[in-house]
Image: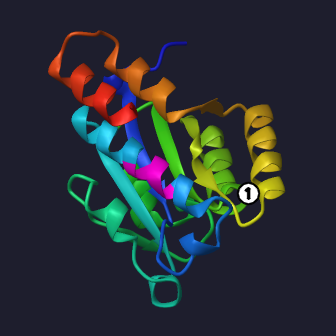
Amino acid sequence: MRIKKDEVIGLVIDVQGKLLPHMYEADKVEEGIVKLAKGLAYLDIPVVVSEQYRKGLGETVESVSSVVVDYNPLEKKSFSCLDERILNDAIFSKNKKYVIISGIETHICVMQTAIDMIEAGLIPVIVEDAVSSRKENDKNIAIERLRSEGAIITTIESILFELTRFSGSEVFKNISKLIK
């Protein structure tokens, strides 16, 4: 099935200052999340941002918060975004079919959120090069499980060009520059 721009919302999970530095390939995943957020902005796709226990883990890193359009982080204490009413409402209020997910940690908050989304009738799209965990193996096993649960696994470049659909437009030019 083709993922179409008008059926999509983005979700950035817990990319916070006290958590991100401890992730496997932290710099690479941060760069990936920034690229994805910029691409979604070029495509005019709304993005919801969660923060896990802000007092303890800090705020969303500036590199990410500065590129999310209408940045308004929503705090949670549960691992799954759907277990928090404010996040659940923010996601479902957009009335979209697909949720493009980036963030940390893949084997905890990303996975639990995605599984709950599947059970709620949404289709989570996990952007493999824009998620991470502290340990590489935890991430890899989570991606395996997410695939078996029914989530779509993709990459930044693949999803952005799929949503762009056609070359020659200003959006295509911006996405192309971003990916290079």
**Residue position marked by numbered label 1 in the rendering:** 107
Q: Position of residue 165 (x, y in %)?
A: 34, 13
Nearer the observer, 33 or 59: 33
Is residue 20 depicted above or below 45 in this figure?
below
Q: Magenta: predominant secondary structure element?
A: helix
Q: Is residue 22 left or right of residue 73?
A: right
Q: Position of residue 103 (x, y in %)?
A: 53, 56
**Between 12 and 32, the one nearer to me in the picture:** 32
Apparent side of residue 16 relative to residue 71 in the rendered image (left or right):
right
Which residues are the magenta region? 30-34
Tag 1: amino acid = His
Under circle 1, the secondary element is helix
Q: Residue at x 56, y 35 (%)?
A: 125
Find out whether residue 31 is within the magenta segment: yes
Quadrant in which the N terminus appears: top right
Q: Is residue 92 visible?
A: no
Foreground: 66 or 112?
66
The answer to whether residue 28 is visible is: yes
At 45% across and 65% down in the image, what residue appears? 85
Q: Quadrant of the C terminus?
A: top left
